[in-house]
């Protein structure tokens, strides 16, 4: 097994499982969306989602992710149903196909030009058919007995739901095999056709891919058995005990995508020539929780965090304390969280050597400049969301502050603007 910081090197495409990896039922897993956003920002890494669940089509997953708070393009989602459709087109061109699958899968395949028939098929496919009936089972067994090749979209026996398990494609195939004596050719994870199709879609070679998921025998096995990497996350089905009992050895095990993100960042952090910083935090008494979340995040990025508290009801005092600490060079950077942000910004700027800039929507478009060239940033917890705050703070801490750089003048202009907007009264 590789070390956590080593394993990510050379990975250009993360093929992410969804259930148990990105969300559990209808709950996003903590930090998973941040991992994805991190990859989206990266110039040399990419991702796609891959799920064996062929009862749904990509559009359904896009909608689900949207409801959970992540917007992705349909092209980012691939299912075992897509792999099977490609497999049929390559290996059984123009064949008449009998499919036991959901209506959405059938419609999707028809759109791709697959000829779906009810009688006299050349090939039969069993999928995760939540509309399965005795009649459908009887038909597929009949066609298999007549010699039609038997293909299954994926091998999963059970599908996890909020209330436990429901029988999946693999279990349906067992019944068919019991009756006919014929075993299906399984597709999806962990089979090589899945890796081949992902290469076809994305252009990445197997050795540039990492399959990431909560199951050893599907997610991890796809990678390690087919020339790619296989990362296990412990947010779903597998535990460390499962790992001990299994013959499949993951390339690496991470607690979660959130933990993986941390190592991802460390790598880019070093590349940028960044360093560990001492970051001092202060806030208004109403923004304590917001500040706590942000501090936790900055700590995870590998920086040292110092809390200047939030006890002082006149938070301008806290701002001045933070500004003095940063101006004295005892600490590298300051972060102030308060109601609107502008007031404390003005207070902090009263200290010589402190350059505080307010980041929120008022200054849209100037964020990058500000985050690189202010030694203190302030933000309004009522204006800025935690996610955006994290992103901006990270950006702000990734570049060395240069007191002689010309952008300081720019910060000064912003400060003047702030003063004009609110005047001293707002402090
Ligand atoms: Mg899973």
Image (cartoon, rainbow, N blue to C red):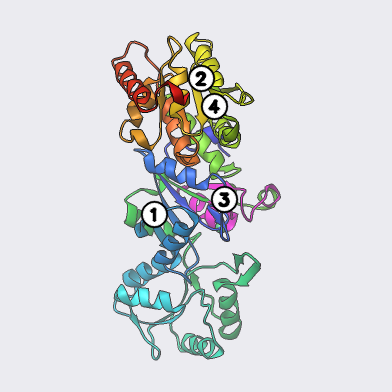
Q: Distance between the residues labelled 1 and 3?
A: 17 Å
Q: Return the residue at label 2.
A: 277
Residue that appears at 40% across and 78% down: 106
- Decide: few, some or many residues near mark 4? Use Cα within 10 Å; few <14, some 14-19, many ≥20: some
237 on left or right of 272: right
Q: Which mark is residue 72?
A: 1
Q: In the rendered view, tell whether residue 266 sits above or below residue 322.
A: below
The residue indicated by pointer 4 is 302
Image location (x, y in percent) of residue 154: 50, 68
In the displayed structure, would residue 102 be above or below residue 188? below
Disc 3 is placed on an element classified as loop
Residue 223 sits inside the magenta stretch:
yes
Image position, residue 66 (x, y; %): 44, 57
Is label 4 in contact with label 2 (beta carbons under 8 Å)? Answer: no
The residue lying at 66 percent from left, 49 percent from top is 243
Mark nearer the viewer, 4 or 2 = 2
Determine if residue 398 is in view.
no
Q: Earlier in the sequence, mark 1 or mark 2?
A: 1
Dot 1 falls on a residue whose secondary structure is loop
Q: Quadrant of ligand 1?
A: bottom right
Which residue has dot 3 on it? 29
- The magenta span reads 213-242
Marks 4 and 2, how far apart at CA: 8 Å
Does residue 204 sit above or below 350 in this rendering?
below
Secondary structure beneath dot 4 equals: loop
Under 8 Å from ligand 1: the CB of mark 4? no
Question: Camera-side residue: 40 or 90?
Answer: 40
């Amino acid at each position: 097994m590789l070390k956590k910081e080593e394993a990510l090197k050379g990975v250009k495409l993360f093929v992410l499982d969804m259930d148990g990896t990105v969300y559990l039922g209808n709950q996003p897993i903590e930090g998973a969306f941040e991992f994805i956003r991190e990859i989206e920002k990266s110039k040399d890494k990419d991702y796609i989602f891959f799920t064996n669940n062929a009862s749904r089509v990509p559009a359904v997953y896009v909608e689900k992710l949207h409801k959970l708070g992540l917007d992705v393009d349909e092209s980012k989602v691939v299912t075992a149903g897509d792999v099977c459709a490609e497999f049929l087109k390559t290996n059984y061109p123009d064949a008449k196909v009998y499919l036991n699958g959901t209506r959405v899968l059938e419609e999707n395949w028809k759109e791709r030009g697959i000829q779906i028939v009810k009688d006299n098929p050349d090939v039969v496919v069993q999928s995760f058919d939540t509309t399965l009936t005795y009649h459908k089972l009887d038909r597929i067994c009949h066609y298999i007995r007549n010699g039609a090749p038997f293909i299954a979209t994926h091998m999963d026996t059970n599908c996890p739901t909020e209330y436990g398990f429901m029988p999946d494609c693999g279990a349906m195939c067992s019944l068919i095999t019991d009756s006919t004596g014929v075993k299906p050719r399984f597709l999806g994870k962990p089979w090589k056709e899945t890796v081949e199709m992902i290469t076809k879609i994305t252009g990445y070679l197997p050795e540039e891919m990492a399959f990431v998921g909560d199951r050893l025998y599907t997610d991890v096995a796809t990678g390690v058995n087919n020339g790619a990497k296989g990362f296990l996350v412990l947010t779903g089905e597998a535990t460390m005990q499962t790992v001990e009992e299994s013959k499949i050895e993951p390339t690496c095990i991470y607690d979660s995508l959130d933990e993986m993100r941390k190592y991802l960042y460390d790598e880019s952090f070093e590349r940028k020539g960044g360093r560990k910083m001492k970051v001092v935090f202060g806030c208004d008494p109403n923004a304590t929780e917001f500040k706590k979340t942000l501090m936790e995040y900055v700590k995870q990025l590998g920086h040292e965090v110092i809390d200047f508290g939030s006890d002082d009801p006149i938070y301008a005092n806290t701002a001045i304390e933070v500004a003095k600490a940063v101006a004295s060079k005892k600490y590298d950077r300051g972060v102030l969280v308060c109601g609107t942000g502008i007031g404390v910004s003005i207070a902090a700027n009263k200290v010589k050597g402190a350059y505080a800039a307010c980041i929120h929507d008022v200054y849209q478009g100037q964020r990058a400049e500000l985050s690189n060239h202010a030694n203190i940033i302030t933000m309004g917890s009522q204006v800025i969301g935690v996610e955006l705050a994290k992103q901006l703070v990270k950006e702000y801490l990734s570049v060395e502050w240069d007191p002689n750089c010309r952008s300081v003048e720019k910060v000064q202009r912003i400060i003047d603007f702030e003063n004009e907007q609110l005047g001293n009264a707002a402090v």
